[in-house]
Amino acid sequence: MVQLQKAQKIVPVPTLLFSDGDLSGRVVRLEGMTATIGRRATSDLVLDDPRVSRTHAQLSFEHGIVVVTDLGSSAGTTLNGERIVGATAVNHGDTIGFGPIRARFEDPARASIPEDPTLVLDAPRAEGQPHLSPRQQQVLLLMAEGLTNSEIGAKLGVTERTVKAYAQELYDKLGVRNRAGAVAEAARLGML
């Protein structure tokens, strides 16, 4: 008598399909882990290209969503052609660029789920530290470098008026009255 075994449930796993570089055509399975991507041999996913930083980016799972974070790479990390700052959610069909290397993200389990435009990912922060948006963090860092509002605007590609609005939001969140106070408070909180 032949004994039948119960079929195992097949769970679709998110993948990256590479279209450039040494990994062109390769599919990498992302199985619920945090993975560092870079040129360094100890990276979870090694991209052997001199234009990729040693520690370039990180892919992680947060609340069932795949998140890509640039780790200060020199060539940058992009999502659908736009350079990212901070943690950014990745959706089925998105293209992630690690410098010049591109990969299409596929998540069969989420392919039929519409994108949620209200999704906000909180960056990890110390206890008692105010939450700053990625743009507010950029403005704060440029303030700390001593740039004027017009110089910050030119660097970020926004108007001086927009920079003033971000600065006021920073002052309110940090409980200070001016840029010197914002930089000092941010330094005290370990945000710089």
Image (cartoon, rainbow, N blue to C red):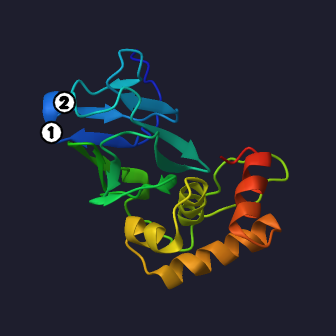
Considering the numbered disc 2 on the image, is that residue within a helix, a strand or a loop?
Answer: helix
Q: Which mark is residue 95?
A: none
Report x, y in % for residue 180.
72, 62
Considering the numbered disc 1 on the image, is that residue within a helix, a strand or a loop?
Answer: loop
Residue type at mark 2: give it. Answer: Leu
Report x, y in % for residue 90.
42, 55
Residue 85 left/right relative to 132:
left
Residue type at mark 1: give it. Answer: Asp
Q: Quadrant of residue 132?
A: bottom right
Q: Residue at x 47, y 39 (%)?
A: 71
Q: Residue at x 34, y 46 (%)?
A: 76
Closest to the observer, 58 or 104: 58
Q: Is residue 115 visible?
A: no
Residue underneath mark 1 = 20
Residue underneath mark 2 = 23
Q: Residue at x 78, y 55 (%)?
A: 185
Q: Residue at x 60, y 81 (%)?
A: 165
Tags 1 and 2 in contact by the CB under 8 Å rule? yes
Closest to the observer, 143 or 38: 143
Using the image, determine if residue 26 lies above or below residue 1.
below
Report x, y in % for residue 74.
34, 40
Q: Residues within 10 Å of mark 2 (few under 14, many from 20)?
A: some
